[in-house]
């Protein structure tokens, strides 16, 4: 059975993104083991002379390393991803590369109609940066709008249309994980680039 890490892109106590990831954990339990992992508690990213990375970020990196793929649930604040998520991704690209060539599925919820669409687009761009280089499921936004009204008391999606849409995308993600396993050339290239890459001394100029 495939193992996935589901990152909660917010530190909000009552989050519909967390609710969505827990729903996926329950709904797809026969197909995959999904561990919902909190980013809550991570400090704001900062560079340091000794390349210090907090233990919580290292623990998350280890979980991602041991997984077959990652699901990220992002809210939208001011048309962008929450500072916590942005900061977490910076830690996960600071001399370590747990997301490199890792299959990623992006989902997002919002209280309004657009379902965090701008945050999801921004997240794709972040995940494509040189030290992250995740392999994001293409053409696959799951945008859950009006998320405060979207779940019933059992934490299930009320809308059959939305749940069927998510089922289809998750099915695609399972196939995508197998497919991306075969992309040997880009994996080798990314590994070579990562081995010599540094923002501080600019050792690679080709894909900044
Ligand atoms: C400071 C602030 C900014 C927000 N900006 C947006 C926004 O740009 N777009 C949006 O759809 N919702 C926005 N929201 C509303 C919700 O926080 C947002 O819909 C969020 O995705 C809900 O996710 P959650 O239930 O996991 O916290 C904002 C809320 C706050 C407090």
Image (cartoon, rainbow, N blue to C red):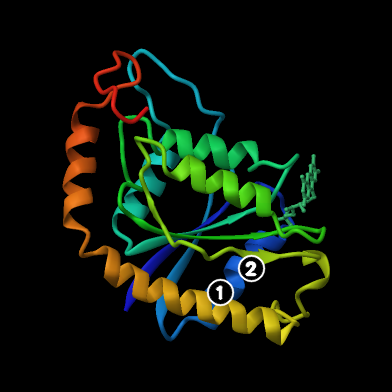
Q: Quadrant of the C terminus?
A: top left
Query: Distance between the Cα atoms at labels 1 and 2?
Result: 6 Å
In the rendered image, is residue 41 in sight? no
The CB of the residue at mark 2 lies under 8 Å from ligand 1: yes
Residues packed near mark 1 inside 10 Å, few (<14), some (14 to 19) or many (20 plus): many
Q: Which of the two residues, 165 or 17, is positioned nearer the viewer here? A: 165
Name the spot of residue 129 as percent of width and height, x first: 41, 37
Helix, strand or loop for disc 2: helix
Residue 186 relative to residue 34: left or right: left
Q: Residue at x 26, y 23 (%)?
A: 204
Which residue lies under the disc numbered 1? 24
From the viewer's perspective, is residue 24 above or below residue 104? below
Helix, strand or loop for disc 1: helix
Q: Residue at x 39, y 30 (%)?
A: 53
Q: Which of the two residues, 117 or 84, is positioned nearer the viewer here? A: 117
Circle number at residue 20? 2
Q: Residue at x 74, y 82 (%)?
A: 159
Quadrant in which residue 197 is drawn: top left
Name the spot of residue 142 as percent of width and height, x first: 61, 66
Circles 1 and 2 in contact, beta carbons < 8 Å: yes
Q: Which of the two residues, 179 or 8, is positioned nearer the viewer here? A: 179
Quadrant in which residue 19 is drawn: bottom right
The CB of the residue at mark 1 lies under 8 Å from ligand 1: no
In the rendered image, is residue 167 in sight? yes
Q: Residue at x 45, y 70 (%)?
A: 34
Residues packed near mark 2 inside 10 Å, few (<14), some (14 to 19) or many (20 plus): many
Residue 201 relative to residue 35: left or right: left
Residue 71 relative to residue 117: left or right: left
From the viewer's perspective, is residue 12 above or below residue 170? above
Name the spot of residue 150 as percent of width and height, x first: 77, 73
Quadrant in which residue 81 is drawn: top right
């Amino acid at each position: 059975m495939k193992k996935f890490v589901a990152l909660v892109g917010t530190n909000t106590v009552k989050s519909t993104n967390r609710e969505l990831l827990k729903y996926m954990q329950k709904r797809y339990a026969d197909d995959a083991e999904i561990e919902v992992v909190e980013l809550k508690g991570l400090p704001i990213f900062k560079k340091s002379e000794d390349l210090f990375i907090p233990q919580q970020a290292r623990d998350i990196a280890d979980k991602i390393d041991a997984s077959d793929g990652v699901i990220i649930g992002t809210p939208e604040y001011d048309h962008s991803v929450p500072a916590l998520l942005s900061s977490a991704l910076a830690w996960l690209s600071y001399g370590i590369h747990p997301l490199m060539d890792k299959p990623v599925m992006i989902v997002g919820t919002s209280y309004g109609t657009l379902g965090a669409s701008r945050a999801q687009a921004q997240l794709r761009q972040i995940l494509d940066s040189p030290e992250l280089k995740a392999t994001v499921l293409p053409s696959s936004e799951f945008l859950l709008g009006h998320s405060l009204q979207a779940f019933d008391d059992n934490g299930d999606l009320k809308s059959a249309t939305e749940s069927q849409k998510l089922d289809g995308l998750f099915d695609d993600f399972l196939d995508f994980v197998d497919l991306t396993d075969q992309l040997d050339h880009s994996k080798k290239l990314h590994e070579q680039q990562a081995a010599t890459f540094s923002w501080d001394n600019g050792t690679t100029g080709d894909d900044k």
